[in-house]
């Protein structure tokens, strides 16, 4: 798959995820075969007010490419400004958020609220496309609810104003995360657009990825939650798509090493005081899969320092070795 001139091969993407797809996790996902990774959502209005956090979210690792920077908002001028800022920071792709279901966001007319206002959505997209020279993509849900499946029509209009790929999260806003993704929505968008289409929602295994590509006509898959504590999923999907064979799961040692690398990188990027609370849940995800892992995961929730975190992971690894376990 190509987005503009950018080759995305194999066509496996890391989903943009607030609180997760930061520089550290993007580097991990990329090292495991995710060919396009996207930042956490960045609010265009906050950026315009020079919010330190929003500016910080745009920071990329040196040489990080290809990378998407995702912006959110409904004011065309602010979105154009945010897009230019993203391009200046090195974005290969500027991605527009039209999926966020959070009340605070939709009450401002942003995120998935744009799915309800076709003209406003097209104005935003057009302003962003005109503001930058890099490709613009839109990540959207299928519609506001099951009585308003607006994505197929919107995708067609976005293509007409110059968007170069659509990522469809196959749920409506009202589904939140409760109702399972319905991949038929991806197929419906496929029927309306010729630009690349990225399918997203509930891909948990390599077989899911293959089935999504086969049944929807999507050109690529985007993986979110299944990569938590398991970034190897990108490699397993790539291998399965190429060979039809499953790679073995990561060993306990692989998990411990990755958890420690993630910890180290987060502390470097964010400093210990911010990194450790964020790493509690991340380490918990890496430590899944031993008989006593519930206990280790509980202890991970109380970590206060990098030293404590390292000691816990090492203790878990010793325990896993004693049990002679690799994964389960
Ligand atoms: C913790 C979390 C944060 C998310 N943040 C964003 C975001 O910032 N921008 C976005 O477009 N989608 C966001 N999403 C949605 C994901 O990108 C993706 O569409 C959704 O999780 C479905 O894919 P999955 O089933 O593979 O997880 C987020 C999802 C989660 C779980």
Image: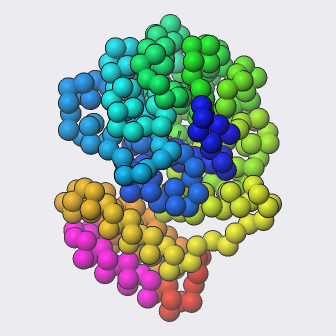
Q: Quadrant of residue 163?
A: top right
Q: Could you tell me residue 166's position as x and y percent?
A: 60, 29
Residue 225 in the image: above or below residue 176 = below
Q: Could you tell me residue 318's position as x and y percent?
A: 43, 88
- For the C terminus, the quadrant is bottom right
Instruction: Out of 169 and 62, give the one closest to the viewer.
Output: 62
What residue is rendered at 24% in x and 77% in y? 307
Q: Quadrant of residue 190?
A: top right
What residue is rendered at 76% in x and 47% in y? 211
- Horizontal relation, residue 66 to residue 191: left or right: left
Asked if residue 175 lies in the magenta stretch, the reply is: no
Number of on-image labels: 0
Residue 48 in the image: above or below residue 272 = above
Q: Does residue 210 appear anywhere in the picture?
A: yes
Main SS class of the magenta portion in the image: helix
Instruction: Out of 241 and 93, give the one closest to the viewer.
Output: 93
- Horizontal relation, residue 71 to residue 160: left or right: left
What residue is rendered at 27% in x and 68% in y? 302
Give the extent of the magenta segment.
302-318
Asked if residue 304 lies in the magenta stretch, the reply is: yes
Q: Does residue 182 appear anywhere in the picture?
A: no
- For the N terminus, the quadrant is top right
What residue is rendered at 37% in x and 84% in y? 315
């Amino acid at each position: 798959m190509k987005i503009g001139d950018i080759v995305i091969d194999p066509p496996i993407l890391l989903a943009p995820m607030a609180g997760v797809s930061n520089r550290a996790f993007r580097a991990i996902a990329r090292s495991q075969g995710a060919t396009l990774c996207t930042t956490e959502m960045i609010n265009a209005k906050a950026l315009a007010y020079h919010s330190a956090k929003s500016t910080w979210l745009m920071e990329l690792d040196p040489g990080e490419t290809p990378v998407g920077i995702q912006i959110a908002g409904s004011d065309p001028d602010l979105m154009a400004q945010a897009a230019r800022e993203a391009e200046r920071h090195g974005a290969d792709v500027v991605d527009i958020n039209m999926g966020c279901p959070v009340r605070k966001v939709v009450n401002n007319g942003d995120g998935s609220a744009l799915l309800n206002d076709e003209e406003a959505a097209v104005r935003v997209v057009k302003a962003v496309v005109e503001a930058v020279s890099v490709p613009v993509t839109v990540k959207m849900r299928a519609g506001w609810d099951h009585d308003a499946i607006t994505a197929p029509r919107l995708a067609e209009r976005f293509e007409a104003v110059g968007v170069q790929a659509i990522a469809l999260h196959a749920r409506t806003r009202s589904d939140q995360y409760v109702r399972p993704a319905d991949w038929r929505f991806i197929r419906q968008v496929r029927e309306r657009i010729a630009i690349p289409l990225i399918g997203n929602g509930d891909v948990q295994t390599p077989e899911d990825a293959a089935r999504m590509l086969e049944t929807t006509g999507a050109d690529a898959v985007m993986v979110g939650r299944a990569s938590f504590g398991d970034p190897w999923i990108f490699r397993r999907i790539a291998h399965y798509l190429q060979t039809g064979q499953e790679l073995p799961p990561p060993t306990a040692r692989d998990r411990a090493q990755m958890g420690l690398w993630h910890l180290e990188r987060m502390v470097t990027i964010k400093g210990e005081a911010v990194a450790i609370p964020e790493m509690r849940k991340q380490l918990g995800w890496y430590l899944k899969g031993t008989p006593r892992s519930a206990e280790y995961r509980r202890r991970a929730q109380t970590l206060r320092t990098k030293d404590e975190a390292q000691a816990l992971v090492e203790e878990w690894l010793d325990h896993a070795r004693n049990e002679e376990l690799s994964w389960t």
